[in-house]
Image: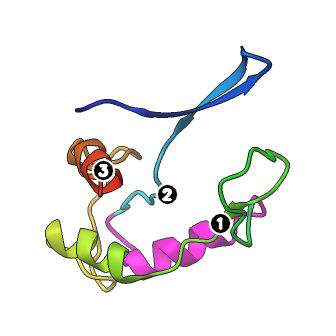
Amino acid sequence: MPGHHYRLFVIDGRLVTAVRWMPARVAGDGVHTIEELLANANRDPGRGEAYGYDFDFGKKRARMAPNAEMMRMLGAQGYALSSVPTARPDRAPAWYDDYRIRRRRR
């Protein structure tokens, strides 16, 4: 089922807020490797330790670190950490929504 992932916060049966979830990502610039792009993104003061899946919006976003899932997704697109991707719009690829939904059903 294609679509977007939203987190809904409901209190006493009333919707308080909704947040559209987007996967962590970096945008290629045609100059830096993916590993360098990750390091640059992790310098953002808004990134820190992972916070889990609670609704404490005051906490920092998790730092992006290479793991097996990241390596598999990079490989599926023909990239490695040493690749220098060309400049593209900063957004998740269209196939990611379908992949994420199928993975959650397991």
Answer left or right for 27 relative to 59. left
Residue located at (85% from left, 48% from top): 58
Crowd band around label 3 with a 10 angstrom C-alpha radius: few (<14), some (14–19), many (20+): few
| Way the structure is coloured | rainbow
Element under label 2? loop
Report crowding for label 2: few under 14, some 14 to 19, many 20 or more residues within 10 A (C-alpha): few
- Comparing 102 with 75, the one in front is 102
Give the mark nearer the N terminus: 1 vs 3.
1
Residue 24: which numbered mark, if any?
2
- Per the image, label 1 sits on a secondary structure element best described as strand
Say which quarter of the image contains residue 63: bottom right
Q: Is residue 76 left or right of residue 57?
A: left
Task: Calculate the distance from the C-alpha at mark 2 to the C-alpha at mark 1.
Answer: 9 Å
Asked which quadrant contains residue 41, the reply is: bottom right
The boundaries of the magenta stretch are 30-46
> Quadrant of the image for the C terminus?
bottom left
Task: Give how far apart the Cα atoms at labels 1 and 3 are.
Answer: 24 Å
For residue 60, above or below residue 14: below
Expressed as whole percent of the image width and height from the top left, the position of residue 2 reads 24, 32
- What x and y, as percent, mark residue 74? 26, 72
Amino acid under label 2?
Ala
Residue 44 lies within the magenta run: yes
- Out of 9 and 33, give the one closest to the viewer: 9
Pointer 3: what residue?
Answer: 105
Q: Earlier in the sequence, mark 3 or mark 2?
A: 2
Q: Residue furthest front?
A: 12
Vertical relation: 101 (above or below) 18 = below
Under tag 3, what secondary structure? loop
> Which residue corresponds to mark 1?
62
Q: Look at discs 1 and 3 and give the one toward the viewer.
A: 3
Amino acid type at mark 1: Ala
Residue 30 percent coordinates (x, y): 31, 66
